Structures are given as C-alpha cells and as structure tokens.
Image: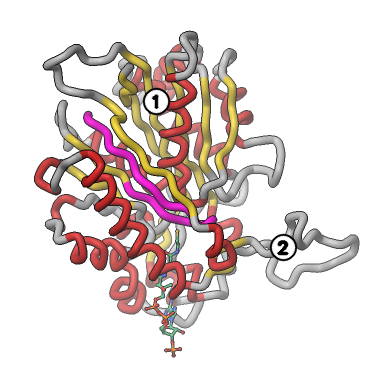
Amino acid sequence: MAIEIIGTGKAVPPRRVSNDDLAARIDTSDEWIRSHTGIGSRHIADEHTSCSDLALEASKNALAMVAGFSGENREERDRASAKAAKSIDIIILGTTTPDFFGCPSTACIVQDKIGADRAGAMDIVAGCTGFVYGLETAAGLLNISKERKRALIIGSETLSKITDWNDRGTCVLFGDGAGAAVIEKTTAPSEGQQRRGLIRSMICSDGSGSESLLFRRGGSRNPFKAGETLEKGIVVEMNGQEVYNFAVKAVTDTVAALMEAEGITADDIAWIIPHQANARIVQAARKRLKIPEEKFFLNIEEYANTSAATIPIALDELNRNGQLKKGDMIMTVGFGAGLTYGGNIIIW
Ligand code: COA
C-alpha cells in the first residue's frame, strides 16, 4: 500500500502582531527578537476563536482541495469540503491547546463540524511534534484495516491563550494557527515504479526532559483547589536553554537517522520542513549536517512558533505555491514538549 497526501490546508487568524507591537508593551525589541529567533510577527486569535475553530478552517481547506475546489468562494468551499468529509475514516488532531483539557477531544469537535459522519477521531499530545506523530499514526491505522481509506491529520494551536504576555522569554516566541492534510491509501507501486507518499517515519521521545516545557498547574499532579486564585492563569513554562540544546540535537539526529535509514543524501531531498520554533535552531542543525540553507523551508518570520501547526502550515504553503513537484522527496522534522521528536519522509 502507499499512503499519499491528497489535500492540504491552513488557517491563521487575521490579526498580525509585529515585534514592534510587543516592544510597545514589554521590555523587548524587534532587533532582539529577530536576531535571537528569526521571528518578525505572529498571528493572534481573537477571544472568541479556539483551537477547533482554526482546525475547522484548515480542515475545510484541505478537504475542499480533495474535492477539486480551488476558488475563493467560501460557500462553494464549504460544499466541496462537506462532500469530501464523508469519505474520511480517521481524524487525528495534534495540539497542546485543546478547546477543553482532558475531554472531549478537539478532534471530535472538528469531526462533528465538518460532518465526517463515519470517522473515528482523537487528539494526540506530542507537543510541537504532533503532526509528525499524527501522520505516522494515521498511516498505521489505514494500513491495518481494509475498510479505512482516508484520514485527516490536523495540527492546531491557540498558544496565545496560554502565554504569559508579561514573560518576554516566552511570549515573543508563539503564534496561533492550524494546518491540515488529508491522506489516502492507494495501491502500492508495482516493481520498477517510483515509490509514492509516506515512505518512512521516526517518532521518538525523551521524557526525562518533561519539565523543561510544561503546564505545571491544572492536571492531576497539581490540580486546582476550590477558591484558589491563579496569579498568571494557566501558562506554559519553559527552560529556553534546555529546550534549545535538545532541539538542535533532535533536528540533527532525526535528519541524519532518516537519511541513513533510507540510504539517501541531502541531494535526494527537495525540501526539509523543520518545526518552526527558532530559526537559530534550524541554522545550528543545518551547519552540523552540512546541508545547504535553501533545502529548508522557513516561514517563522511571519507566523512564529505555532507548535503542532508549523509543519502542516508550511506544507500547505509549499503545495499551494506550486513548489512541490511530483516525485519530490520531502522530509519533515519536529521536536517539542514531552519531550518528543521525529520526522517523516514523503515522496510527493
Ligand atoms: N527581549 C529582550 N531580551 C530578552 C528577551 C526578549 N524577548 N528574552 C530574553 N531576553 C534577555 C534575557 O533576559 C537575558 O538577559 P540577561 O543576559 O541580562 O540576563 C538575555 O536576553 C539572554 O537570554 P537567554 O535566555 O540566554 O537568550 P537565548 O539566546 O538563549 O534565547 C530563547 C532565548 C528562548 C530564544 C532560546 O533559548 C530558545 O529559542 N530556546 C528554545 C525555545 C523553543 O524552541 N521552544 C519551543 C520548543 S517546541
């Protein structure tokens, strides 16, 4: 069997917040943020928009592509996506900012809103590696069942809702957004034919680093008590240096391991889509790997770190810009809370 990507979509909130906008509120500067992270702006959801709202938009765009729709008219897009949604067997949504903690899953909310009547749906908690994990999990679920043919994988985040906007060490890094991809199980290429679709994945973890990126309060380890007031709300806490060191090694090791396992060199790869957390992380790994800069697709300057959404957003941008040619080899590489890391190799 082959597992091919047949549709991609993204959604980012219209409100764009520049580095200068942040510098007007807290002690930071455009120069510091750009030189330390490569980030120029981020898109921030309004108070009424949640994770499932962005996921829904990205999913509709991906599903409409599956139905052959490519115009601007939203009603026509919705009709096209509703039709394609009926063919989805599995929905997997990676997020660290679900609509509700614990349950229900955000994937179930999306399942209902897109009208994917026959799909199973679940969330994956793998931090910013959520899409990499989701793709491999969905492919596995399609491969083990004769009946299942199509899956929708989503990375969606509203990190602005769990960011401490007075902590300059974290708030400058994050943005909101969602990306989605539809995969389909097709017949395996016959002998002599080029391979297609998802050909290899690595999904790894190192839980010893679990405290370097976490929500400390609210779970069963540190539940809220009746009457308790929270000084900062529920906010993400991060040890930036620890995560940075882990991330550079994770990207370097994952790319090297995937290349070795597949018996390929950087020359064989058209695009590497790294998780967009900090352009310096990508540069440091790239130098260690000795891979040319132009192989890495970066859009962090516009969107900042949208966690599980960065890779599918980047994939959709490459796809819609016509930058992916049939037969191109693409590698994704992600890392994030957990700590988790991994990557996929896809032949377009
Ligand atoms: N604006 C201005 N100054 C800032 C700042 C900001 N937004 N954030 C931190 N600083 C200051 C610090 O207070 C410190 O000042 P000091 O030297 O007077 O104490 C100085 O800049 C250096 O801080 P440091 O934390 O050492 O900076 P850094 O070069 O390590 O960069 C990160 C910080 C967060 C950008 C970097 O560690 C990082 O990207 N880590 C990984 C984060 C990540 O990828 N998270 C998501 C994983 S999925």
The percent position of residue 300, horizontal first and vertical second, equals 32, 57
Give whichever of 5, 27 is nearer the camera: 5
- The magenta-colored residue range is 333-348
* Residue 341 visible from this viewpoint: yes
Quarter of the image for residue 200 reads top left
Q: Name the amino acid, label 1.
A: Val
- Location of residue 123 with respect to 302 vertically, above or below: above
The percent position of residue 11, horizontal first and vertical second, equals 42, 40
**Secondary structure beneath label 1:** strand
Looking at the image, the residue that sits furthest to the bottom is: 27
Give whichever of 135, 70 is nearer the camera: 135
Left or right position of 42 against 290: right
The percent position of residue 171, horizontal first and vertical second, equals 50, 68
Left or right position of 3 against 238: left
Q: Which residue is mark 1?
A: 182
Give whichever of 203, 148 is nearer the camera: 203
**Badge 2 residue CB within 8 Å of ligand 1:** no
- Mark 1–mark 2 Cα distance, whole angstroms, equals 35 Å
**Of the image marks 1 and 2, the number of the one nearer the N terminus:** 1
Q: Residues within 10 Å of mark 2 (few under 14, many from 20)?
A: some
Quarter of the image for residue 84 reads top left
Q: Residue at x 22, y 46 (%)?
A: 260
Residue 167 is inside the magenta segment: no
Q: Which residue is mark 2?
A: 217
Q: Main secondary structure of the magenta part?
A: strand
Q: Name the amino acid, label 2.
A: Arg
Looking at the image, the residue that sits furthest to the right is: 226
Looking at the image, the residue that sits furthest to the top is: 147
Image quadrant where one finds the C terminus:
top left
